[in-house]
Image: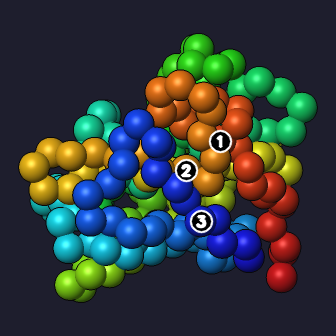
Amino acid sequence: METDSLIPHLATPPLAIRSIAARITAHDPNWLAIRWRIEGASQLVVPPFAGKGRADELWRTTCFELFVRPDGGDCYCEFNLSPSERWAAYDFSAYRKGMAERVMPRDPICTLRKGGSVAIFDAAIPAVALPALPARYALTAVIEENGGHKSYWAASHPPGRPDFHDPACFTGRLAAPDNA
């Protein structure tokens, strides 16, 4: 599958992070698997382990996100995935409107591996939790580095402040999975 080279928003350049690549690594009737690879991760702030479970405001520190908007509509959903193993899922009826918790049949799986300069974050979302496909999607990241410095990463950014909800960020295409 295609790899997205994420770019930091110009208003929030990173300190040590050199690049982030994100891609869907697998999509079958059971799971959607995603990987983010962070180069220059020596100053990456990793939220402490908190155990699986739903939590709000994960974007206040290092967090990885997936936005999915089914074709032909304004509604979309957002999945926030934390190295702490906490997660959140929301539905929106239109751009930043009608936010509600998205029903999740089971917890996503979140795993971070970090070396000296590289970090890999893998996540798997239950396929039944996804909206109707085909859809447009956005893979994004909020990255906190030492000292509380945050940068906002996406394949494309709209003008103005960082805003992952903007349709300009939905650059990927997600088809229904193969049943093989």
Dot label at residue 5 = 3
Three-letter amino acid code at the position of disc 3: Ser
Per the model, the C-alpha gap separating discs 3 and 2 is 8 Å
Per the model, the C-alpha gap separating discs 3 and 1 is 13 Å
Q: Are marks 3 and 1 in contact (CB under 8 Å)?
A: no
Residue 63, position as x, y percentages in the image: 35, 51
Q: Which residue is denoted by mark 1 in the rendering?
A: 169
Which element carries disc 2, helix, strand or loop? strand
Per the model, the C-alpha gap separating discs 1 and 2 is 7 Å
Relative to the observer, which residue lies in front, 69 or 41?
A: 41
**Mark closest to the chain's N terminus, 3 or 1:** 3
- Quadrant showing the C terminus: bottom right
Three-letter amino acid code at the position of disc 1: Cys
Q: Residue furthest left?
A: 147
Q: Are marks 1 and 2 in contact (CB under 8 Å)?
A: yes
Three-letter amino acid code at the position of disc 2: Ala
Q: Is any atom of residue 159 visible in this view?
A: yes
Q: Residues within 10 Å of mark 2 (few under 14, many from 20)?
A: many
Q: Which residue is denoted by mark 2 in the rendering?
A: 154
89 vs 139: above or below:
above
Q: Residue at x 46, y 51 (%)?
A: 8
3 vs 84: above or below:
below
* Residue 64: quadrant of the picture: bottom left
